[in-house]
Image (cartoon, grey):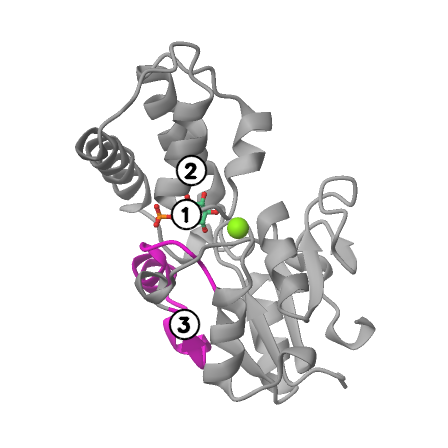
Amino acid sequence: MSRFKAVIFDLDGVITDTAHYHYLAWKELAESQGVHFDHEFNERLKGIDRMGSLDLILASAAHQRQYTPEEKLALADTKNKHYQELISTMSSKDLLPGAVEALDTVRRAGLRIGLASVSKNAFTVLERLGITDKFDYVVDAATIARGKPDPEIFLKAARELGVAPADCLGVEDAVAGVTAIKAAGMFALGIGHPFVLTEADVVITSLKEFNLAAY
Ligand code: BG6
Ligand code: MG
């Protein structure tokens, strides 16, 4: 039914719409620093870890003042607290259409299932969604040295699942994430728009269109 032996999913924006919550929390933080923040800017932050995202925001500030490491940590913490507030009421109703069906299809086909999210809140989100036990392996973002677009997180997931990268299908909504999948030597399924996710092997609008046999 599939030429792959494992499917490795991203979380935010693929399985659940936390990408929107990250957007809201970053927007408030950016504007508190006088930085204009819109959906176009947000696209560049998708898949980028917390401190990396903050650096991109501060680098685009008109005032260009230097922030101390302590100030940066405090700003990142403010954003994270806001984000955690936004996700605190999440439940299985926040699963994106087609997500559970896709996971169940992969399971029925006998493939291994991994999760590769650079979010340090990923375990909490999975718990709230009630889908933790659907994964054979979830990468702990705290153990990753280099975030996406580096392939490290996808390579770690493949290694822990005991599957060669070439036998893995990676699923991502972020430009940086698709780059990471391709750099890992995997097949990249993009969730979003083909003119944004130009490096992906195949792009679909949402997991509702997930068709394992077709890739
Ligand atoms: C990624 C999101 O999954 O996780 C990014 O796409 C986010 O927007 C990143 O910044 C880090 O998340 P967290 O929860 O560790 O701040
Ligand atoms: Mg994502």
Q: Is residue 141 above or below residue 43?
A: below
Residue 125 included in the magenta stretch of the image: yes
Which quadrant of the rendered structure holds the N terminus?
bottom right
The kind of residue on which mark 1 rests is Asp
From the viewer's perspective, is 69 left or right of 199?
left
The kind of residue on which mark 3 rests is Val
Image x and y of residue 152, in percent: 49, 66
Numbered range of the magenta stretch: 116-139
Mark 2 touching mark 1, by CB under 8 A? Answer: yes
Label 2 residue SS: helix
Sequence-first tag of 2 and 3: 2
Q: Which residue is mark 3?
A: 138
From the viewer's perspective, is 101 left or right of 128?
right
Q: Is mark 2 within 8 Å of ligand 1?
A: yes
Q: Is mark 3 within 8 Å of ligand 1?
A: no
Q: Residue at x 27, y 40 (%)?
A: 80
Q: Residue at x 47, y 37 (%)?
A: 20
Between marks 3 and 1, how big is the CA–CA gap?
A: 16 Å
From the viewer's perspective, is 149 left or right of 131?
right
Label 3 residue SS: strand
Q: Which residue is mark 1?
A: 49
Viewer-nearest of discs 3 and 1: 1
Please rate how many residues cluster around mark 2, counting C-alpha atoms within 10 Å: few if below 14, some from 14 to 19, many from 20. some
Relative to the observer, which residue lies in front, 71 or 107? 71
Relative to the observer, which residue lies in front, 175 or 109? 175
Label 1 residue SS: loop
Q: Which residue is mark 2?
A: 53
